[in-house]
Amino acid sequence: MKGRIITLSLLVGMFALLASACAMPVATPTDTGAATQTIELLYMTHTHSPAVSLNETIIAEFEAANPNIKIIYDHSPHAAYEQRLLTAFAGGQGPDVFWAGDWMVPQFLAAGIIAPVDPTAFGVATQDEFEALFELGSLDAFKSNGKIYTGGISEYNTFSLFYNVDALIEAGFEPLPKDRPITWEELAEIAAKLTIKEDDVTVRIGLAWPFETPIWTVLIQEPMLRQKGGELINPDGNPDFTQESMIAVMTYLQQLRQSDAIDPAVSIDLLQDFANGRSAMIFGGPWAARPLNTINPDLNWDIAPLPQFADAVDRVTTLYAWAWFVSAHSSPEKQKAAWEFVDFLTSKQREWWDEVGYVQARKTEIDGMPLQEYYAQSDPRLATIFADYAYGQFQFRSTKYFELSDIWTRAQTRVLTGEDVMAVLMDAQAQAEAAMAD
């Protein structure tokens, strides 16, 4: 997964424009009654070369089978994609069908951007039958008031622990167990011993992740918070940065830094540096396996379950997903065609894995095997990741997701530089309350 850092002030402006746009009448094309009238759909995704290529292939197949539907495909880089998507809707030129992350659903619903799914496009009569087409719980982040607002998941992920087997053995550790998670406390000890310095210069860091990318902050720390029994958003809908569970998580991170197990000052390319030995452990999803094998086929790596605190209330991992949405602003004719297109996209589970490495949540069998078994046969180490899905929970839901994830990331930065944890979290709480009041 690529990090996406959104400029907070610009996002606030975008949602203000969206609110205004949604308050005005939306002009939609009128069907002239011609049965063969061509329906044009604007389809937008982020840019990822293998995915772009497969999208183009699927579009060609779909258009050949549906000559009255024309797909206009548009994609843009990860860093600019969400901003560009919101800008398009605010300007009245939003796509008819598009990719977006699950964390954006509350904003989309508040702005009236997305339409509830049409089950009939997927060959079933009811929403319950539609949901049964997918892995249990995989659509939970896309539900609101009894309705489902996606036609399926384009990229379904969790995080597990990738590690360099040879580095662990050289440091005196055995390969990590696959049938149970080690504790975060054990991880801290291992990562500290895996860090190598020469003349005070770090040549290998024990554990690494993109510290400045807000979504990574949430994806790594929120499972830790939940393991301690906490939630960022409390039952009354407000953020709580000063709860005991958050203090414990931030204190743990500070101790990681003080022991040299992690170092946010060491700039990394997550997969490249792990493959080339500049980091010994990383967090990653199933999307990481293929590029690691490509970058360094000789790397002896393996996967362990996401660690859990020794006093964890529950075993918790994370879930996050990119999914297909249909615009609520599109005409009924376009929405019907868009849902049919999404049905076709989600039916290509083999291709999304074989050509892109994207895990799908729509159930199927390939070559007589359940989908996850088919995935794991490409690399048996992936079975550990698929076991972690069972403990996954989606990120917190809030229309202020970007503001709160930014606040959390800034707090993390200050804690890792040695500032007092409680003072930092009190500042974060004040910032969060101000953001919620806007």
Image: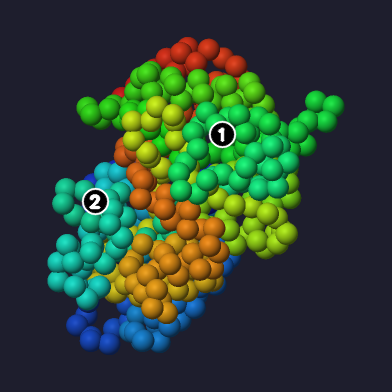
**SS category of the residue bearing label 1:** helix
Q: Amino acid at mark 2?
A: Lys
What residue does disc 2 label?
Answer: 143
Which image quadrant: the C terminus?
A: top left
Position of 168 relative to 33 (above/below): above
Say which mark, if any, is on residue 220.
none
Assign a secondary structure to mark 2: strand
What is the C-alpha distance between the residues marked 1 and 2?
A: 35 Å
Q: Decide: few, some or many residues near mark 1? Use Cα within 10 Å; few <14, some 14-19, many ≥20.
A: many
Query: Relative to the observer, which residue lies in front, 88 or 280?
Result: 280
Badge 1 or badge 2: first in the primary sequence: 2
Q: Nearer the viewer, residue 330 or 60?
A: 60
In the image, residue 113 lies at what x, y percent? 29, 53
In the image, taking residue 316 as reference, residue 214 lies left or right, namely: right
Which x, y percent locates residue 268?
Answer: 68, 42
Q: Based on the displayed image, in which of its 4 quarters is residue 186 positioned?
A: top right
Mark 2 surroundings within 10 Å by alpha-carbon count, few (fewer than 14), some (14 through 19), many (20 or more): some
Task: Work out whether residue 101 or residue 287 is closer to the camera in this orientation and state it.
Answer: 287
Residue drawn at the location 66% of the way across and 47% of the way down: 164
Q: Is residue 324 above or below residue 414?
A: below
Based on the displayed image, in which of its 4 quarters is residue 72 positioned? bottom left
Residue visible at 23% across and 29% down in the picture? 235
Question: What kind of residue is marked 1?
Answer: Leu
Query: How many labels sit on residues?
Result: 2
Where is residue 247? Give x, y as percent. Answer: 43, 19
* Residue 251, percent from left and from top: 50, 20
Q: Is residue 356 visible?
A: no
* Residue 293 visible in rendering: yes
Residue 187's disc is: 1
